[in-house]
Image (spheres, rainbow, N blue to C red):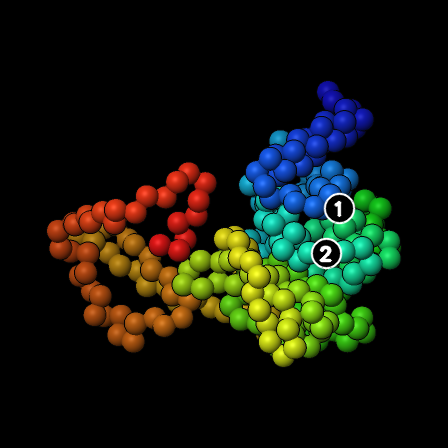
Amino acid sequence: MRDETQDEARAAELRDKLAGELLAAGYLRSARVEAAFRAVPRHAFVPAGTPLDVTYQVDRAVVTKRDERGVAVSSVSAAYVQVAMIEQAELKPGMSVLEVGSGGYNAALLAEVVGPDGQVVSVDIDPEVTERATALLRAAGYGDRATVITTDAGHEISEFGLFDAIIVTVGAWDLPPAWLRQLAAHGTLVVPLRMNGVSRSIAFRRAGAQLVSTSAVVCGFVSMRGAGAHVDRELRLSDPHGRVVTLTFDDGAPDDPALLDGVLAGPRGEVWSGVTIKNGVSFADL
């Protein structure tokens, strides 16, 4: 039976391995972010019993809460997505950061990057999520370096002043005005926006009254709840063999879905596009 010391030693090895993989893949670009990923114990923020090998996989998200339907409503995001978004924000020591969506681990990473002179505020609409994040941050030694608040992030949080960066870790369909009001001049907003069925983490730099995008990374997140929630419309189509295809519409669903009745009843056809996508490149824009 392994003891706690052995597990911590193994976790430290896997943490360094994870950072090395993120560095080799080009996700890690700055020394402070790399140091944060080597320092913060990711395993301290996932559900008890989660295997260390699973916890420290580059592309593995770990669900921390599901709703009554079994749908994930909170998770520790995949490491490659977390590092991509933090790098997009271009954080510096002493900055003030607002995190939308709490889990604890990402807030601890942010606290390491902005340092003791910085400020990290993490908000979530779910009290169970914020209570858990608060307890885990405290246990991991970050209780005084990240503040967790239960509130709807679609509303303004005025007591902390303006933020140099706002990092949204839940899937959004639009930008609430409150986020813009809380973003400092020349600040950066990093948000996973869903467009035509694909989510992209987009970094927006504030330029006066405008936001200018500076980068975009394909990603995936649990959906936002509260004032910023958006309900997708689904249309289920059946073929003559009883198989079902589900079409999901972010917006602009057909006015008369009945027009699609029987659309799959005809003979199957295949048409090759002639476009070749190399390994490791997203085909989300096709």
Residue 33 locus on image (x, y percent): 71, 46
Residue 156 locus on image (x, y percent): 70, 76
Q: Amino acid at mark 1?
A: Arg
Residue at 35% across / 54% down in the picture?
Answer: 286
- The mark tally for this picture is 2
Classify 240 as above or below 35.
below
Residue 135 locus on image (x, y percent): 79, 51
Say which residue label 2 marks.
91
Q: Which mark is residue 86?
A: none
Residue at 75% across / 41% down in the picture?
Answer: 35
Is residue 125 visible in the rendered image? The answer is: no
Cα separation between marks 2 and 1: 9 Å
Nearest the camera: 206 or 197?
206
Classify 72 as above or below 22.
below
Residue at 25% across / 49% down in the picture?
Answer: 273
Is residue 269 visible in the rendered image? The answer is: yes
Nearest the camera: 71 or 171?
171
Residue at 42% across / 60% down in the picture?
Answer: 197
Q: Give the SS element for disc 1.
A: helix
Nearest the camera: 3 or 282?
282
Q: Check disc 1: other Cα within 10 Å, few if <14, some if 14-19, many if 20+.
A: many
Q: Amino acid at mark 2?
A: Leu
Locate residue 127: give its quadrant.
bottom right
| Image quarter in which the N terminus is found | top right
Residue at the far top in the pictured view: 1
Q: Which mark is residue 32?
A: 1
Left or right position of 198 against 169: left
The reply to whether the C-beta atoms of the residues labelled 2 and 1 are less than 8 Å apart is: yes
Left or right position of 231 against 132: left
Residue 217 locus on image (x, y percent): 53, 53
Closer to the chain start, of discs 2 and 1, is 1
Nearest the camera: 213 or 52?
213
